[in-house]
Image: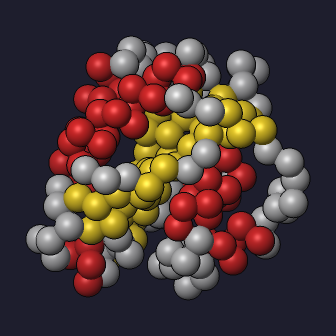
Amino acid sequence: MGISMGDEAASSTAVTVLLSLGSNIEPERYLRAALDELATAFGPLRVSPAYRTPAVGFDGAPFLNNAVAMRTALSLPALEDWLHALEDRHGRDRGGPRLVDRTLDVDVVFYGNGILREDGQVRIPRPELEHAFVLKPMADIAAEFVDPLSGRTLGELWRAHPQHGEAFEAVSLS
């Protein structure tokens, strides 16, 4: 496993983290519950609108996806453990195929300006950033955040995305 964490991610102080959240089983309920728990545990959050998007990679109900920007002093492994426990508390089933309907999916897309490679593949930033359902909400709340792989801001990446300019249905979580 190769880890290259930039200055911000390598320090023991709080780092900026961008999360992607998704649900297609009672999505308003589960995303709202996740946001409440994240705010309680980590303090102030920047939260994007939630967008309804088709399931990707399998035939399932549409998802609601949004993004959260927050700060944490937790290490990446500790944060991922906390997020897995959050998903589990809200009924996440890890026993079946990877691409299935789910109550809650919370992924760390960016951990500061760090890059994490495992088995020769980049894991952080998450490759799913290529999907509009991940990139658009992130660009909504962190347009000036620089992707350490491309050196481009999330706003620039979104403006260059093939789905930029398409209408996305925003759904209220309140």
Say which residue appears at 71% left-offset and 19% top-offset.
Answer: 61
Say which residue appears at 39% left-offset and 26% top-offset.
Answer: 33
Locate the N terminus by quadrant: bottom left
Say which residue appears at 26% left-offset and 84% top-offset.
Answer: 7
As drawn, 156 above or below 173: below
The answer to which quarter of the image holds residue 143 is bottom right
Horizontal relation, residue 24 to residue 41: left or right: right
As drawn, 82 above or below 138: above
Residue at the farthest left position: 12
Q: How many labels does the image show?
A: 0
As drawn, 174 above or below 116: above
Q: Which of 132 and 43 is in front in this view?
A: 43
Horizontal relation, residue 90 to residue 61: left or right: left
As drawn, 90 above or below 173: above
The answer to which quarter of the image holds residue 151 is bottom right
Residue 48 horizontal/vertical position (percent) = 56, 50
Residue at the farthest front position: 174
Residue 1 visible somewhere in the drawing: no
Say which residue appears at 87% left-offset and 60% top-offset.
Answer: 165
Residue 144 horizontal/vertical position (percent) = 55, 77
Residue 15 visible somewhere in the drawing: yes
Q: Nearer the viewer, residue 125 or 117?
A: 125
Coloration mode:
secondary structure
Residue 27 horizontal/vertical position (percent) = 56, 23
